[in-house]
Amino acid sequence: MILVLVLLMVVTTVSGCGVPSHRPDTSRVVNGKEARPYSWPWQVSLESFYPTCGGTLIAPNWVLTAAHCITFHTYRVVLAEHDMNREEGPEQSIMVAKMIIHPNWNDNCVSCGNDIALLKLEKSAVVSDKVQPACLPQHGVSLSHDQPCYITGWGRLYSGGPRATTLQQALLPVVDHSVCSQSDWWGSSVRATMVCAGGDNKSACHGDSGGPLNCVGKDGRWYVEGVTSFVDGRGCNTPKKPTVFTRVASFIPWISETMARN
């Protein structure tokens, strides 16, 4: 059976990472809802001629996103963004100085994995109560089945629906690889270097690509455990086809080496 995939386009832990000054509302609401403003202070909007993808601030001058998001020559990131239709005051717009796509990424084979990229900013973001980096997980760490994590972004509210104008969040419980790789789920299209989450009535959708899968650690800090990669071609909320994320914990050596070299 040929599965149609849809891309969702339209290191050392940083000190002080993963602790929002404005705490997110994490009541176990499955359906997506508007996020509390600035409660995900590492979320960025990646923009060229228009907003295209999301991303995660992992250091004052580094953003993590998906490789498939990089299709233009010039990008900027906008931090402290909440309402896309309003200039609210705390936004920081910074040009991207360097785009580094994982060397094994193949844009003709998203299910081959390695859908990850690093963006070096022209200048460091000003860290504040509204702009803070997320923590990176330890290399190789695994998430437990049904672990509550949250996706954030300005993607479409549902397949074929309008894009969100304000930052949305949705609870996406982790689906263990042993389940997600079953033949009636994603099968061989999902690899050990990926994370599945959701698969019920909420998922990522077009425009959420590159954004974070946010999971809270035992230390109470928030970690970017996934980079939003793809959903099923039949729609964003297809049963047994949870959102697939690049598993950040599989790429910590590459992230660390890339940031050190550049």
Image (cartoon, rainbow, N blue to C red):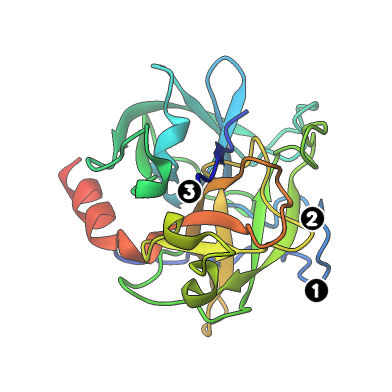
Which dot marks residue 28? 1
Circle 2 residue: 36
Residue 37's disc number: none
- For mark 2, does the 10 Å Cα neighbourhood hold few (<14), some (14 to 19), or many (20 or more) residues? some
Left or right of 105: which side holds 183? right
Q: Please tell me in which quadrant of the rendered image residue 66 appears.
A: top left
Q: Residue at x 35, y 48 (%)?
A: 112
Q: Residue furthest bottom?
A: 218
Give residue 29's quadrant in the image.
bottom right
- The secondary element bearing badge 1 is classed as loop
Q: Which residue is mark 3?
A: 57
> Which residue: 48% across, 67% down?
181
Q: Is residue 121 above or below residue 111?
A: above
Q: Amino acid under label 2?
A: Arg
Q: Position of residue 12 (x, y in %)?
A: 30, 65
**Viewer-closest of 13 and 46:** 46
The reply to whether discs 1 and 3 touch (Cβ–Cβ < 8 Å) is no
